[in-house]
Image (cartoon, rainbow, N blue to C red):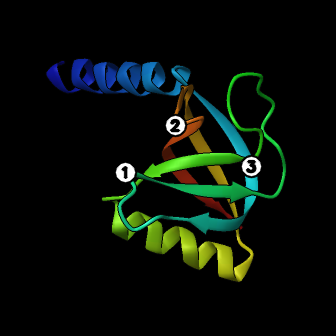
């Protein structure tokens, strides 16, 4: 019974997290990072439907070096990514929460 309750709680937390973000399948065209920047910007091929933020970019905290490395590999191979991003703007763009590589 405790396992079922724990699983239900985990699934509800995942659902709550998913509902707090938006999703877009896109190809990364470029990654822009300044040396002293807090965030790096992923420039996407297709615009994200938005009115408040940049239309074709999401930001990633600069300290997430491993994540940026994986995303740069996806960019160089032309692999599409499904980006999950917060629905509020950070530095003029949406902040990346998670991503999936699309085969």
| Residue 93 spot, x, y in % from top left | 60, 37
Q: Tell me if label 3 and label 1 are in contact, CB under 8 Å.
A: no
Please tell me whether mark 2 or mark 3 is closer to you in this view.
2
Crowdedness near tag 3: few (<14), some (14–19) or many (≥20) residues, C-alpha within 10 Å: some
Which SS class for mark 3? strand
Q: Tell me if label 1 and label 2 are in contact, CB under 8 Å.
A: yes
Q: Is residue 52 left or right of residue 95?
A: right
Please tell me whether mark 3 or mark 1 is closer to you in this view.
1
* 57 over 16 or under it: above or below: below
> Which quarter of the figure is the C terminus placed in?
bottom right
Identity of the residue drawn at 57% across and 40% down: 84
Tell me how far mark 3 sits from mark 1, CA to CA: 25 Å
| Residue 96 spot, x, y in % from top left | 51, 44
| Residue 41 spot, x, y in % from top left | 57, 55
Q: Which residue is mark 2?
A: 91
Identity of the residue drawn at 45% across and 74% down: 69
Of pointers 2 and 3, the one earlier in the residue sequence: 3
Q: Quadrant of residue 6?
A: top left
């Amino acid at each position: 019974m405790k396992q079922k309750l724990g699983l239900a709680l985990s699934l509800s937390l995942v659902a709550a997290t998913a509902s707090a973000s938006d999703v877009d399948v896109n190809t990364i065209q470029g990654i822009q990072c300044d040396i002293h920047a807090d965030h790096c910007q992923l420039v996407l091929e297709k615009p994200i439907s938005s009115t408040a933020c940049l239309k074709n970019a999401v930001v990633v905290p600069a300290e997430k070096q491993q994540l940026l490395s994986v995303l740069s590999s996806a960019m160089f191979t032309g692999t599409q990514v499904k980006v999950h991003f917060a629905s509020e703007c950070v530095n003029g763009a949406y902040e990346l929460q998670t991503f999936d590589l699309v085969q």
